[in-house]
Image (spheres, rainbow, N blue to C red):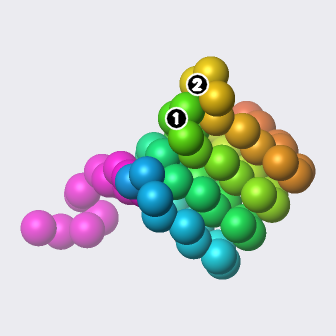
Amino acid sequence: MNSKNSSPKSTILSPGTHIQGEIFSEGALVLEGVVEGRIVCNRVNIKPAGAVLGSLNCTSLRIEKGGRVDGELQVMDQPITF
């Protein structure tokens, strides 16, 4: 598979997962766990048990009831590429 022709994939952080650090992705992030740090991603879906403790930069954001962002939030117009 040629990586230039493949579309970005989704990343799922399951309940009970706790990450300290940074996540960078051109794809989607489904967050059911906790990220303490920085997220830069195109699409983010924060589920009821999900939380961001730090900063979140994305182009599309959905926060389901119970999900939370505690820190800086920026929803941008331009797609994120690396």
Tell me the magenta residue range. Answer: 1-13
Q: Is residue 48 toward the left or the right of residue 61 in the image?
A: left
Q: Residue at x 66, y 77 (%)?
A: 21
Q: Is residue 7 toward the left or the right of residue 17 in the image?
A: left
Q: Residue furthest top?
A: 65
Name the amino acid type tagged 2.
Glu
Q: Position of residue 12 (x, y in %)?
A: 38, 52
Q: How many marks?
A: 2
Name the amino acid type tagged 1.
Lys
Dot 1 or dot 2, earlier in sequence: 1
> Is the N terminus in the top left, top right, bottom left or bottom right quadrant?
bottom left
Q: Residue at x 83, y 48 (%)?
A: 70
Q: Is residue 62 visible?
A: no
The 10 Å Cα crowd at callout 1, few under 14, some 14 to 19, many 20 or more, is many
Name the element at disc 1: loop
**Does the magenta-highlighted stretch encompass residue 5?**
yes
Q: Position of residue 9 (x, y in %)?
A: 32, 53
> Is the C terminus in the top left, top right, bottom left or bottom right quadrant?
bottom right
Q: Position of residue 33 (x, y in %)?
A: 52, 54
For mark 2, what is the residue? 64
**Does the magenta-highlighted stretch encompass residue 74?**
no
Q: Quadrant of residue 69?
A: top right
Q: Are marks 1 and 2 in contact (CB under 8 Å)?
A: yes
Q: Position of residue 50 (x, y in %)?
A: 58, 44
Please name whichever residue, 40 or 66, is drawn nearer the observer in this view of the structure. 66
* Label disc, if present, on residue 47 of the rendered structure: 1
Q: Main secondary structure of the magenta part?
A: loop
Q: Is residue 25 visible?
A: yes
Name the element at disc 2: loop
